[in-house]
Image: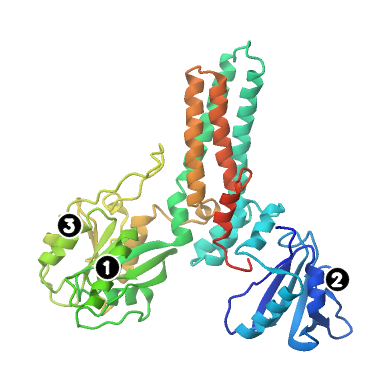
Amino acid sequence: MFDDTIAAIATPLGEGGLAVIRISGAQALTVADQAFVPLGKHSTKPSQATSHTIHYGKVIRAGQRVDEVLCAVMRAPRTYTREDVVEITCHGGILATKTVLDIILENGARLALPGEFTQRAFLNGRLDLTQAEAVADLIHSRTDLALRAANEQLAGKLSARINQLRDDLMHTLAHLEAHLDFPEEDIAPNTRAQLERQLESGIAFMDELLRTAQEGQILRRGLRAAIVGRPNAGKSSLLNQLLGHDRAIVSPIAGTTRDTIEETANVRGIPVVFIDTAGLREAQNEIESEGIRRSRESLGRAELILHVLDASEPLTAEDESFLAEFVGKQRILVRNKTDLPARMSLAELEHRPPIQREPDAANVPGHHSKITATARADTLPTEPAQVTTAMTGPPMVEVSCTTGHGIEALKDAIKSLVWSGAITNEMAQVTINSRHQDALRRARESTALALAALRANASLEFVAFDLRLGANAVGEIVGKTTTEDLLDSIFRQFCLGK
């Protein structure tokens, strides 16, 4: 399969000034020769061109000119895929771009699969698996910090630490297997103690990496924050304020929002996907009923709830119902319409039951759980009359979506609730994703079993078996131990042309 020459459009489809068609493979130069005609005395056919040069010409089909183009020639191995690569830059536009691609395919290339260029870069040794994933992270970055994190991973910062961990485990495994070759000789006490220290060090290092998982996932896919509350509490107005522009229709008529609206905003360096939900009430018609159903689905996927309450109205039974319903979620109470005379008592809200969060599923010693509202109360902003936190309840922020009062304090509260401490450049250097997290959990579990067996003077075969499982799990992260299914699951998430 990877002997094929592949081609794809490497730029987004649509009208634009330019588009790029990328060709890679052993026959890339030959395929390009048949489609490209050089113009001018300094241009030449791709197969005759020196590496890393650009040539002016035209793309033809059946002798007819299709487009005026530039043709970039890059010879192996100094290319993205470490294969011969040709990139044709043509005029943008769906028809022009597709026609040039069709001509390339007619001349012997096949259409690339999603992520196949990067997959070839991995298989040809130019990138390891974490660096390949960083390419996708770089493309999808939505904040400066996410962009820095992707660049750090692409530069190999995470790979270096993972490779060192795997080397340390393999070194310890080699010691154990050397003793297996001479079963009549027991391990000396000082040697056993040294092996135990090495395994303890490896486990501590895994714990350190696992502690970055939550932050890494937030940077890559964003935090999903659902805005909920009874109709006309100001949910759509709050969304517009948080985004900085009018995205949702605002009306005094209850039930205006009939569907969920999702928009991403940069909140203190964190990408937050805000979801404006239909007012949760008894539906008045079939359309509103569908909107409420979709809202319920969004609530199930949200990591944070912004519960909007109307401070100009007394607390209703409907409000009480929602306060009880979302007690198990990480949430912030948003007391809106504070520019109007207050009719909702603060005392009614300050003594809500505490948020209870389940510990992280890994149950890894030292691996922090998701932050609870009460645990983060001491780090919330202290803007007067805007943020309060009862000892037994979630943070509460007072805002006015009409004047914008309290919106900045709400952004501070969101950041404080989901991200422990300051956001620093050092955090961007090593943050793991969910795949890395799963592999590290398995590696830690196997290494811990190996350590326990070693301490219990169990047979070294058992110790070595568990340790090899751990080293293999670590190797999965950088691609030193992989399966075809694993590679498919990673690269099919890429776009065509990358």
- Does residue 278 appear in the picture of this structure? no
* Disc number for residue 324: 3
Q: Looking at the image, which is closer to me, 17 or 422?
A: 17
Image-quadrant location for residue 254: bottom left
Classed neighbour count for the residue bearing mark 3: other residues with Cα under 10 Å, few (<14), some (14–19), many (≥20): few
SS of the residue at dot 3?
helix
Spatial separation of the CA atoms under disc 3 and disc 2: 70 Å
Picture coordinates of residue 138 (x, y %)? 57, 63
SS of the residue at dot 2?
helix
Spatial separation of the CA atoms under disc 1 and disc 2: 59 Å
Is 164 situated left or right of 5 in this image? left
Picture coordinates of residue 261 (x, y %)? 35, 74
Is 272 situated left or right of 78 in this image? left
Pointer 2: what residue? 47
First along the sequence among labels 3 and 1: 1
* Disc number for residue 97: none
Pointer 1: what residue? 293
Relative height, residue 215 to residue 251 (above, below): above
First along the sequence among labels 3 and 2: 2
Spatial separation of the CA atoms under disc 3 and disc 1: 19 Å
Picture coordinates of residue 262 (x, y %)? 37, 71
First along the sequence among labels 1 and 2: 2
Is 118 situated left or right of 376 in this image? right
